[in-house]
Image (cartoon, grey):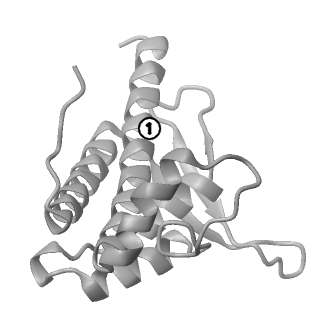
Amino acid sequence: MSDKARFERHALNLGKLTGNLQTIEMAARLAIVKLDKAAGERVQAQLPQVRVGDLVESNAFTNKDDLNQTLEKYNKRAPLVCRVDRKVIVALRDGLAHGRVFGVGTMKHLRLLKFSRKATDGRVAVELAIDMTDEWFQENIRLLNEAVAKITSALDYEIREFS
């Protein structure tokens, strides 16, 4: 396989991970709001029409909770069979958001590294070191697909494929 084809596949897989992570956060926020019918009605009425500068009520859809906080709140409300592994999802998201991806020389796969934010004597700890192999991508795509399925089940939401 050529380097170009390998990096194109990497970009496609990275897009799948990113899209699923965004879907998970959005669906979890919607599931939390859905449990409060009044808040749910306001979200549906307000958000499609908002403009820059408008003020909207703070709720699970609009608040500043990060992914970890959102999934923690979702898991507290979701049926047991619909709960997700929050720590694994957040760790993946943080690695992709705050890590560094690189490839040099004859490396067959790109490598994802994440470093601590605090330095000791001018050195930082490596918190994550992963070879982004096809198997790594497929396992993480599967994990996120399962989480999306659980959250959409809690929402009683039909998944539709784009054509």
137 w.r.t. 11: above or below: below
33 w.r.t. 145: above or below: below
Q: Residue under label 1, please give it.
A: 14
- The residue at 60%/49% (across/down) is 50
User: 45 left or right of 84?
Assistant: right
Residue 22, horizontal then vertical, whole percent: 44, 51
Kindly tell me whether residue 87 is visible in this rendering.
no
User: 90 left or right of 142?
Assistant: right
**Where, quadrant-wise, is the N terminus in this rendering?**
top left
Residue 16 sits in quarter = top left
Which of 17 and 29 lies nearest the eye of the viewer?
29
Disc 1 is placed on an element classified as helix
User: 125 left or right of 31?
Assistant: right
User: As shown in the figure, which amino acid type bears the numbered disc 1?
Assistant: Leu
- The residue at 40%/28% (across/down) is 12
**Where, quadrant-wise, is the C terminus in this rendering?**
top left
Residue 19 sits in quarter = top left
